[in-house]
Image (spheres, rainbow, N blue to C red):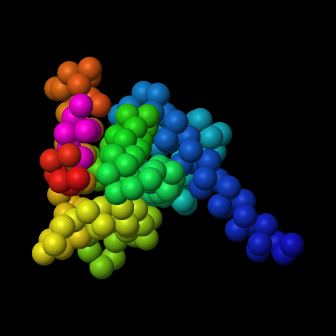
């Protein structure tokens, strides 16, 4: 291994450590607890080393969001692959999405609530974000209905899931009805 390759590997490892530490801090204490000073202390590197990887917290949030988008896409695909039939796939998709949002609130915030400097629904949208949307589209396009653009149907279904995830987390919806809400969404919005 050349010196250059070793340095590149070490740099990539430091970057993974920064992102993992930021994510862990955010999940435990919220994004306000994630500062460059605390990150530098936690990873035992100086702040200039941290800034050599990320210009600031915004880019770190973006890195966590991209990692989360990849994980969410994997979770949704795994859930739908195990389901039999369109209705079961849509239900599995909805549950996987809502479960991800509940289990990873800081990552979900990085994806959809915070400014991570990422472009959404544009030409320069990063691939992990496109792939997460594709995971939704793959399942929902089969139930969009005649004359309905699958992308538009997927956006609408996604917006409904996001609303459920956000309102549930904020305590605005009674938790005992969570499963009924998911079933209602699948039944009415997808007309299955």
Quick check: 170 left or right of 39? Answer: left
Residue for point 43% across, 34% down: 103
Residue for point 37% across, 34% down: 102
Number of numbered discs: 0
Front residue of this view, candidates 186 and 168: 186
Q: Is residue 123 above or below residue 173?
A: below
Residue for point 30% across, 62% down: 140
Q: Is residue 23 above or below residue 27?
A: below
Q: Is residue 173 above or below residue 51?
A: above
Q: Position of residue 188 (x, y in %)?
A: 15, 47
Front residue of this view, candidates 66 and 158: 158
Q: Position of residue 109 (x, y in %)?
A: 33, 43
Quick check: 93 left or right of 3? Answer: left
The furthest residue to the right: 1
Answer whether residue 192 is visible to the viewer in this image: yes
Q: Magenta region's main secondary structure?
A: helix
Residue for point 64% across, 53% down: 14
Q: Position of residue 175 (x, y in %)?
A: 26, 22
Q: Position of residue 84 (x, y in %)?
A: 44, 53
Residue 174, picture quadrant: top left
Provide the residue span drawn in magenta. 180-186
Residue 143, picture quadrant: bottom left
Front residue of this view, candidates 175 and 83: 83
Q: For residue 183: magenta?
A: yes
């Amino acid at each position: 291994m050349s010196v250059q390759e070793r340095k590149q590997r070490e740099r990539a490892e430091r970057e993974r450590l920064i992102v993992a530490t930021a994510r862990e801090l955010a999940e435990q204490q919220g994004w306000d607890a994630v500062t460059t000073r605390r990150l530098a202390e936690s990873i035992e590197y100086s702040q200039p080393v941290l800034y050599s990887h990320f210009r600031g917290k915004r880019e770190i949030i973006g890195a966590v969001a991209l990692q989360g988008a990849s994980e969410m896409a994997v979770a949704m695909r795994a859930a739908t692959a195990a389901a039999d039939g369109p209705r079961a796939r849509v239900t599995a998709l909805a549950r996987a999405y809502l479960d991800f949002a509940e289990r990873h609130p800081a990552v979900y915030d990085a994806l959809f609530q915070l400014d991570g400097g990422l472009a959404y629904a544009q030409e320069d949208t990063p691939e992990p974000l496109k792939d997460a949307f594709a995971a939704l589209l793959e399942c929902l396009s089969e139930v969009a209905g005649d004359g309905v653009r699958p992308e538009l149907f997927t956006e609408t279904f996604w917006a409904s899931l996001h609303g459920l995830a956000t309102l549930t987390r904020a305590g605005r919806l009674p938790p005992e009805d969570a499963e009924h809400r998911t079933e209602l969404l699948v039944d009415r919005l997808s007309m299955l």
